[in-house]
Image (cartoon, grey):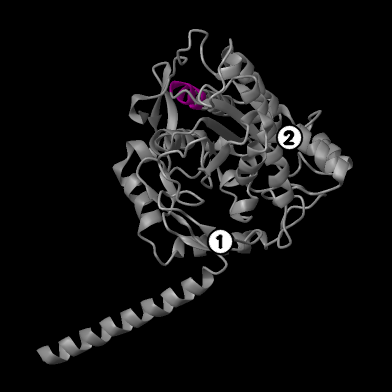
Amino acid sequence: MIRQVLSALGLIGLGIALALLVVDLGVRIANHWFPYFYCYDAERGWGLNPGAHGWYTREGRSYLRINHDGFRGPDYPLTKPPDTIRVAVLGDSYVEAMQVAEDKTFTAVIARELAESPILKGRKVEALNFGVDGYGTLQELITLQRKVWKYHPDIVVLAIFLGNDVRNNSVALEPDQCRPFLVPENGRYVAGGPFIDSPGYRLWCEARFDYRDLRLFDLFKNTLEVMLHGGSGPTPQHPIEQAINYNIYKPPVDQTWREAWAVTETEVTMVRDEAARHGAMFLAVTEENGIQAWPVPAVRIRFQKHLGVPDLFYPDRRIAALGDREGFAVLMLAPPMQAYAEAHRVFLHGFSNTPAGFGHWNEAGHQEAGTLIAARLAAMIAARQCPKCGIPTRGAGPSASGQAPDGKAPASDSPSALH
C-alpha cells in the first residue's frame, strides 16, 4: 500500500515537473517579444539587473548590456581617470534608451560632443547612463545618493520627462506603488507610501521583481494590453499615448495635481541640492515628447485646440520658472527640438516597428537632444560654473552654480531616511 502511494506521488511530482518545464519553455519563447532586464531594489523599488544582456525589439532594436553595478554601459572604474570630466545622467526610460544602440543614446552623444568643445582643451569626457525605466524623481535622487557619487562625477544632469514624471511622483496618481514617495507630514515631506509603510506590500514588490524567473507577470500584462487595445498605436488624428498624462499641458485644476506638481518641484530642487553638496555642476533638462516635436505644425495646432491650450510648453516653462526661483540652470528641449523637426521634416520619435512620431526618441532624436545638452554644458563650463572641471570660478552666482553666494549648499527638505 505504502509503495503504491509513493509511486503515485512520484508520478504526480513528475507530472508537475514536466508541466513546469513546458510553461518555462513557453514563457522563455514569449520573452523573445517581452524581454526583461530588471530586479528588485530595496531602496528604489526596482533597478536594472546587473549583468543582464540580450536583444530588445519591442520598440526599435538594440542589444542591451547591463554592467556589474546595474546601469547601462561598460564597467567604469570608480577612480576617475586623469584629465577626464565625468557627467552623470539621471532619468527614466528616455535616459535608459533601450530602443537604440548604446553608442547612439543621447548620453553617449553628450560625451562625444562635449569632448570636442574647445573649452575642455582635449580632455576626455565620460557620460554615465543611470536611467531606469519608469523612475520618478525621488528614485533618481536615491540613485544619485546611493550609486552615483562613488564615480566622482563633475556634472549631474537630471533629465525630466514631464509626460509622466509628475504622475510618477504622486502617491495619489501613480498606479505602480512599488517605489518610495515623498508625502506631506506636519508641514514637511517624508518618505512614505505602501512600499515604505507596509512590510507586506514591500514583500510583494520583492516577489514581483526577484522571484519570477518565468516572467509570467510580464507575459500576462503585455498580453492583456494587446487584447484591450488591439495592438493599435496613436495616430496623427488621435495622438494619445498611454504613457503620457495630458493634464500636464495646462495649469492643474484640482488639488491632487497641484500636490503632484508641488512634490515634483520639491524633488527636482532636492536633486540640485544634493549635487551642490558634492560640488558638482547641475543642469535640469526637460525632455520633449512626440507631439511637442511633431514636424507638421497643423497636427500640433489641432491637438492644442483639442486640449484648449495656446501651445504645448506649459510643463517645460514651469520647470524653467522653478530654476529661476531656486537658482539652477534648466534646458528646455521641446522648443528647439520642435524647430529642428519642423525645419528638417523629420520625426524624432518612432521606429520601423512602431508608429512614426510617437514613443521614445529614435537615433535622430537622441542625436539632437545630446547635441543641445552638450552645447549647454559647454557654455556653463565656459562661464566657469563647474567647480570640479578645473576652470577657475569667478563670481558665479546661485543661478550659475546651484549654490548659495557663500558657497554653501542650499537647505533641503530631504527626509533623513534618504541620507
Query: What residue lies at 47% left-to-right and 23% top-to-bottom?
Result: 279
Label 2 vs 1, first from the N-terminus:
1
Residue 163 on image: x %, y % = 64, 39
Horizontal side of 345 relative to 385 (left or right) equals: right
Residue 216 appears in the rendering: yes
Crowdedness of circle 2 by 10 Å Cα count: few (<14), some, many (20+)? many
Q: Secondary structure at mark 1?
A: helix
Query: What residue lies at 39% left-to-right and 65% top-to-bottom?
Result: 213
In magenta, the rendered stretch is 270-277
Query: Residue at label 1?
Result: 222
Quarter assignment of residue 289: top right
Q: Are marks 2 and 1 in contact (CB under 8 Å)?
A: no
- Residue 273 is covered by the magenta coloring: yes
Q: Secondary structure at mark 2?
A: helix
Residue 415 on image: x %, y % = 38, 24
Residue 304 versus residue 46: which sits nearer the camera? 46
Residue 296 appears in the rendering: no
Residue 356 on image: x %, y % = 77, 54
Task: For the C terminus, give its image quadrant.
Answer: top left
Query: What residue lies at 35% left-to-right and 37% top-to-bottom?
Result: 196
Q: Nearer the viewer, mark 2 or mark 1?
A: 2
Q: Inspect the image, locate mark 1, and give the three-letter code of the amino acid beneath it.
A: Asn
Q: Main secondary structure of the magenta part?
A: helix
Horizontal side of 354 relative to 385 (left or right) equals: right
Furthest-left residue in this view: 2
Task: For the N terminus, give its image quadrant.
Answer: bottom left
Q: In whole angstroms, how far apart are the C-alphas of marks 2 and 1?
A: 30 Å
Query: Residue at label 2?
Result: 334
Q: Inspect the image, locate mark 2, and give the three-letter code of the amino acid beneath it.
A: Ala
Residue 73 versus residue 76: which sits nearer the camera? 76
How many numbered markers are drawn? 2
